């Protein structure tokens, strides 16, 4: 519907402009000008109220969507704690994947949780020795002159958990932007609090894709030390960066994020960013959404 409105707007504006210039006194000129005004009003109202916003296709019953989001958020918070309840995380993620096998990064987090459980249970000294050898082999590949080789091994580090953090942080300074993108993604999965400051540095990378993935990774490792840097990230010129920064601020559960998110809504033009900002405010308390919505609609 929005595409139709855009095409119609262009056609009517073109016709009205031509008629105004060439036939200002013609009987059809005034109706065309009126049509332009009406379409502009409809587009503005759609931007404010989202009348024609496309619905995201999903086969998941509405009753289960809320459950998935709640379980996933609980998993993320648990995985960020110093002593995560791995059994709970595994059960929650298995429940999520039983409903939607492709849901976000649930499968990756499940693999990580299963690895943590095996590590906590001390399974197999031979297996540990084998993994140590694999880890050293991967470290050697990180200094390969071919960026394709370095990029190919980044995600393999995830299985090593905390041991992988330092090598991944170093890769955030790699000269190849694709390697930096992969490193930021991997740090979001295994980095914990140690990854926050390096990812905040990556949030100012010259490459927009690195900034995007750094912002997304910060959603998973966000803590109070990240708030000021994330607030600055709301000013990024890239809409995707602003989206994920808003989400990270919402998941931070830090009330310092409320005012910057409201201020963002008062000037933000991207509908997706606005949606993420409202969602972030909801994460920080439903009352914030009720307060912010009238202020945002006034702009």
Image (spheres, rainbow, N blue to C red):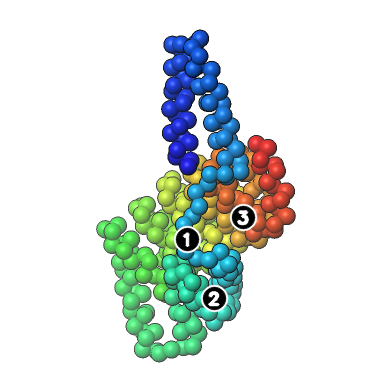
Q: Earlier in the sequence, mark 1 or mark 2?
A: 1
At 56% from the left and 68% from the top, the residue drawn is 64
Q: Is residue 261 left or right of residue 123?
A: right
Q: Which residue is mark 3?
A: 280
Taking depth in this image into account, of 170 and 23 the one nearest to the observer is 23
Taking depth in this image into account, of 200 and 86 the one nearest to the observer is 86
Query: Tags 3 and 1 in contact by the CB under 8 Å rule?
Result: no
At 45% from the left and 38% from the top, the residue drawn is 4
Above or below, comparing residue 236 to residue 257 in the picture: above
At 51% from the left and 76% from the top, the residue drawn is 95
Residue 165 x/y as whole percent:
46, 68
Residue 168 x/y as whole percent:
42, 64
Secondary-structure class at tag 1:
loop
Tell me how far mark 3 sits from mark 1, CA to CA: 22 Å
Residue 58's label in the rendered image is 1
Tell me how far mark 2 sits from mark 3, CA to CA: 22 Å
- Counting other residues with Cα less than 10 Å from the Cα at mark 1, is it few (<14), some (14-19), or many (20 or more)? few
Q: Earlier in the sequence, mark 3 or mark 1?
A: 1
For discs 1 and 2, the disc positioned in front in the rendered view: 1
Residue 246 x/y as whole percent:
58, 52
Q: Which residue is mark 2?
A: 92
Residue 34 figure quarter: top right
Residue 179 figure quarter: bottom left
């Amino acid at each position: 519907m929005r595409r139709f409105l855009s095409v119609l707007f262009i056609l009517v504006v073109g016709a009205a402009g031509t008629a105004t210039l060439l036939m200002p006194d013609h009987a059809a000129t005034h109706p065309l000008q009126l049509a332009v005004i009406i379409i502009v009003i409809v587009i503005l109202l759609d931007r404010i109220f989202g009348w024609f916003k496309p619905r995201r296709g999903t086969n998941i019953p509405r009753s289960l969507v809320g459950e998935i989001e709640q379980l996933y958020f609980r998993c993320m918070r648990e995985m960020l704690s110093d002593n995560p309840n791995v059994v709970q995380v595994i059960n929650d993620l298995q429940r999520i994947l039983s409903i939607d096998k492709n849901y976000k990064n649930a499968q990756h987090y499940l693999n990580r949780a299963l690895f943590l459980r095996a590590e906590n249970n001390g399974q197999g000294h031979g297996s540990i020795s084998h993994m140590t050898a694999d880890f050293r082999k991967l470290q050697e590949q990180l200094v390969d002159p071919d960026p394709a080789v370095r990029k190919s091994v980044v995600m393999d580090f995830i299985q090593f958990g905390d041991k992988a953090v330092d090598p991944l942080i170093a890769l955030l300074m790699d000269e190849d932007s694709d390697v930096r993108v992969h490193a930021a993604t991997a740090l979001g999965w295994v980095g914990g609090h140690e990854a926050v400051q390096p990812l905040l540095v990556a949030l100012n990378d010259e490459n927009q894709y690195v900034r995007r993935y750094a912002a997304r990774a910060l959603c998973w490792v966000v803590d109070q030390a990240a708030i000021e840097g994330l607030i600055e990230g709301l000013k990024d010129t890239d809409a995707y960066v602003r989206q994920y920064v808003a989400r990270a601020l919402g998941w931070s559960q830090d009330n310092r994020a409320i005012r910057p998110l409201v201020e963002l809504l008062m000037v933000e033009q991207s509908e997706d960013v606005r949606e993420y900002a409202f969602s972030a405010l909801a994460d920080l308390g439903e009352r914030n959404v009720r307060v912010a919505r009238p202020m945002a609609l006034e702009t």
